[in-house]
């Protein structure tokens, strides 16, 4: 990995740490062996930040071999030893928080205030949570469930985990994959998106510097087709965890099935934002804009479909559009910036295509344009509000993954909940009302892994994150994530201390 000179040390002070390469295998940085490279680009300027030598199958094999070699000792460590290592890990990341924040902003285009206040503190909190949770990996208590026999359940690590993380939250997604896996005693090979490898590599280096043994955490930075598919199909990988689109998730599942791997999928989302007619309108408007525009809308839990009961509909559309127009686009490193660019020009053009096609069947109330000339060559797109689209239209049913909110009216509570459930996805949702019975019904009947009430987007380390339906299965964060990264074993003791010489007669009869 090399620096072409487009990035100042002040903007990215950790750049010299990548001189040795873009793969992190067995505790050290190395160069990829595929013979191909990929430019990491600052989406705010279009400038090349670094060039990675991409991983090929040989690098994946080396990373898996390192993880497999490290597994017996790490799995055999006591919960207290793993916990202590994770506490040290949290301290190292906290000490390097500014490096992480700047690297994340640079590769993703996120406002620096967001990475400083949300991404990095959230990651440190995740490490601290799993440092404690590592000491509470319990099976079931012993019991006499079968006559003179005592049974109990052991909870054991699975082995080498192969994980693939997306580009929208590269640091947090690396943490969500790595932490429960290693806290449970597994070792891991993580492939970050080739667009955003920097903070994953910093994360692995911080873990090593904190004393986590070589080979426990390995990073390969290659393409999904070459490195990702090889990792998923590798015979020595016991489990695959993937976060990304539903379409790619189906391909991952297809490959993993061939070797009967454990599989965890966190896939796409199209979160409904249901506003009942007794809601606090100002709170709902502010929640909708924040929930829709977080991370420039590149969030699988972002508010994308606002269903507003008809008495509030016109006012909601008007006020939401007005508030969106006050959002400040700009340099992610500038203090006054509210919204950064999309991850790439390709993604910006994809979002613009959805909006342009919607003009034929819906009303673009505000936004719907690229601020050409105002922000250089960055991948910016204005916050966009679309009203009056049909429920079966593309902008309502498909994941846009950009700063676009679609607003539709509904009449009855039954209709609002039915519309909320009327997509293939089920990752997150929110309901807005002052009525506890309405909100209670929403939490019961909306089919999503998370339902917020009078809020949208906050997450905490102690609670699970995962979807229903086409949004995948399995949980990130919380103690529930250990269900993904452990396997249970039934152990049974004969309590009589007598050799059962007649046992064969019970099974086979007299011989």
Image (cartoon, rainbow, N blue to C red):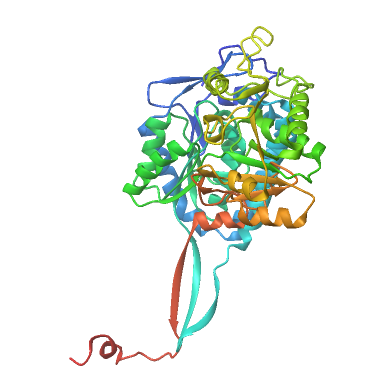
The answer to whether one can see residue 209 in this image is: no
Q: How many circles with numbers are drawn on the protein?
A: 0
Q: Judge from the rendering whether residue 272 lies leftward or rightward of residue 488; answer left or right.
A: right
- The quarter of the rendered structure image containing the C terminus is bottom left
Q: Please tell me which residue is depicted at 76% across the width and 44% down the height of the picture.
A: 277
- Front residue of 126 and 253: 253
- Front residue of 214 and 399: 399
- Front residue of 2 and 195: 195
Residue furthest to the left in view is 511
Q: Judge from the rendering whether residue 198 lies leftward or rightward of residue 224; answer left or right.
A: right
> Which percent across, then down, holds residue 305?
63, 36
Q: Please tell me which residue is depicted at 50% across the width and 26% down the height of the picture.
A: 21
> Which percent across, then down, holds residue 204?
57, 38
Q: Does residue 454 sit above or below 149 in this rendering?
A: above
> Which percent across, then down, holds residue 212?
57, 46
Q: Quadrant of residue 509?
A: bottom left
> Which percent across, then down, holds residue 55?
42, 29
- Front residue of 424 and 498: 424
The answer to whether one can see residue 417 in this image is: yes
Q: Please tell me which residue is depicted at 46% across the width and 52% down the height of the picture.
A: 71
């Amino acid at each position: 990995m090399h620096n072409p000179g487009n990035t100042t040390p002040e903007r990215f002070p950790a750049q010299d740490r990548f001189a040795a390469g873009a793969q992190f295998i067995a505790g050290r940085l190395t160069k990829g062996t595929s013979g191909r490279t990929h430019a990491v680009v600052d989406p705010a300027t279009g400038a090349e930040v670094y060039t990675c030598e991409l991983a090929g199958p040989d690098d994946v094999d080396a990373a898996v071999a390192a993880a497999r070699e490290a597994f017996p000792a790490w799995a055999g460590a006591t919960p207290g030893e793993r916990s202590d290592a994770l506490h040290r890990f949290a301290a190292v990341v906290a000490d390097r928080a500014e490096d992480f924040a700047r690297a994340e902003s640079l590769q993703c285009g996120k406002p620096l205030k967001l990475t400083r206040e949300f991404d990095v503190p959230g990651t440190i909190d995740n490490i601290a949570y799993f440092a404690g949770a590592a000491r509470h990996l319990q099976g079931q208590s012993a019991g006499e469930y079968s006559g003179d026999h005592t049974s109990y359940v052991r909870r054991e690590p699975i082995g080498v985990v192969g994980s693939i993380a997306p580009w929208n939250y590269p640091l947090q997604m690396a943490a969500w994959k790595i932490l429960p896996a290693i806290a449970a005693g597994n070792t891991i090979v993580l492939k970050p998106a080739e667009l955003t490898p920097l903070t994953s590599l910093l994360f692995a280096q911080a873990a090593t510097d904190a004393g986590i043994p070589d080979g426990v955490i390995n990073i390969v930075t290659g393409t999904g087709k070459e490195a990702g598919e090889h990792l998923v199909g590798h015979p020595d990988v016991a489990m695959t965890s993937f976060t990304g689109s539903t379409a790619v998730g189906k391909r991952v599942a297809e490959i993993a099935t061939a070797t009967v791997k454990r599989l965890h999928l966190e896939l796409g989302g199209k979160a409904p934002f249901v506003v009942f007619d007794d809601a606090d309108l100002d709170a709902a408007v502010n929640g909708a804009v924040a929930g829709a525009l977080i991370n420039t809308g590149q969030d699988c839990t972002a508010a994308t479909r606002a269903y507003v009961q008809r008495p509030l509909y016109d006012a909601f559309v008007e006020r939401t559009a007005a508030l969106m127009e006050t959002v400040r686009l700009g340099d992610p490193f500038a203090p006054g910036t509210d919204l950064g660019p999309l991850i790439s020009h390709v993604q910006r053009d994809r979002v613009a295509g959805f909006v342009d096609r919607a003009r034929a069947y819906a009303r673009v109330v505000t936004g719907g344009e690229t601020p050409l000339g105002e922000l250089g060559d960055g991948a910016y797109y204005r916050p966009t509000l679309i009203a009056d689209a049909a429920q079966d239209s593309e902008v309502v049913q498909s994941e846009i993954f950009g700063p676009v909110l679609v607003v539709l009216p509904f009449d009855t509570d039954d209709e609002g909940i039915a519309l909320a459930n009327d997509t293939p996805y089920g990752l997150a949702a929110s309901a807005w009302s002052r009525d506890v019975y309405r909100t209670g019904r929403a939490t019961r009947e909306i089919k999503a892994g998370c339902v917020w009430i009078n809020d949208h987007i906050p997450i905490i380390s102690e609670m699970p994150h995962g979807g229903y339906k086409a949004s995948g299965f399995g949980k990130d964060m919380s103690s529930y994530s250990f269900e993904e990264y452990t396997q249970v074993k039934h152990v049974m003791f004969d309590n009589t201390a007598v050799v059962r010489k007649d046992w064969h007669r019970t099974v086979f009869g007299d011989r």
